[in-house]
Image (spheres, helix red, strand yellow):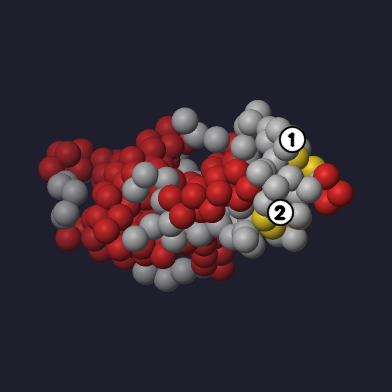
Amino acid sequence: MLELDTIFGWLVPRPYKPNRGSAKSPWPCCDKADEKSARVCHVCRGATCNQCHGFFNGHWICGPCRDHIKAELERERAEFSHFPLALAGGLIAACVSATLWCWLAIKSGMVVGFAAILVGYLSGLGAHLMSGKRRGAPVQWAAVPCAALGIVLGHYAISFYFYKVQLAYIDRAAAEAVTFADPAVVGYFCDHYGFLTPFDAITLSVAMGAALILPMQRTAAVR
Ligand SMILES: [Zn+2]
Ligand SMILES: [Zn+2]
């Protein structure tokens, strides 16, 4: 299931938001529960005291919440061993979103340049989800090249389509014979995307940023 939190997660800096559901620590909070120092846990609103509390970004939290948060942050930390799965997820997402982008171009008759942002974003999301919702450098390094590949692939597929359409006005038979890797298509693609307009540069930066930031390690000071 996609949470809204994941979808908007790329709006950095990404803080970790604790969630302990409905489990509320009861009183007495621990074996040596100290009534004088009793306080409400910042996360579950249950009881905690001087003897057992922890800290979450400077707020008092109960022992179970501290253990839960630490375990959750530890669980989502990506290791290098998660890189292949993240790469596979990023590749699948990049290909699917490039196809969607091409479909959009065919339907609208326009390139819709800012759709590249969606390719970047979905590549990051694909890498994150496929790696088992991990975050951190190994997932980020998988997501970024996938996003770049998806954007080039999307632009290329769109070039292929428009080249065919334009050629069909002149020579229908030749247009039908054009293959995906035709040197003429490569030339057409290079003519149109060989240089970056300021708009392209901005779109590309945002797209790469989305792929890089979405699977970023979340931060919290817990002890
Ligand atoms: Zn708590
Ligand atoms: Zn206690």
Which residue is disc 1 drawn over?
Answer: 27
Taking the spot 86% from the left edge, 49% from the top edge, the residue there is 36
Residue 147, position as x, y percentages in the image: 38, 56
Residue type highlighted by circle 1: Trp
Whichever of callouts 2 and 1 sits on the residue coming sooner in the sequence is 1
Give whichever of 21, 157 is nearer the camera: 21
At horizontal 65% and vertical 28% (from top left) the residue drawn is: 22
Q: Residue furthest right?
A: 36
Q: Residue at x 25, y 55 (%)?
A: 84
Q: Secondary structure at mark 1?
A: loop
Dots 2, 1 in contact, CB < 8 A: no
Which circle marks residue 51 in the picture?
2
The Cα–Cα distance between marks 2 and 1, rounded to whole angstroms, is 13 Å
Which quadrant holds the C terminus?
A: bottom right
Name the foreground residue: 70 vs 54: 54
Query: Could you say where residue 63 lies in the image, as x and y percent from the top left?
Result: 63, 48
Tell me the kind of residue under disc 2.
Answer: Gln
Q: Quadrant of residue 25?
A: top right
SS state under label 2: loop
Estimate the x, y position of residue 18 in percent, counting from the top left. Answer: 63, 45
The structure residue drawn at horizontal position 71% and vertical position 54%, both measured from the top left corner, is 51
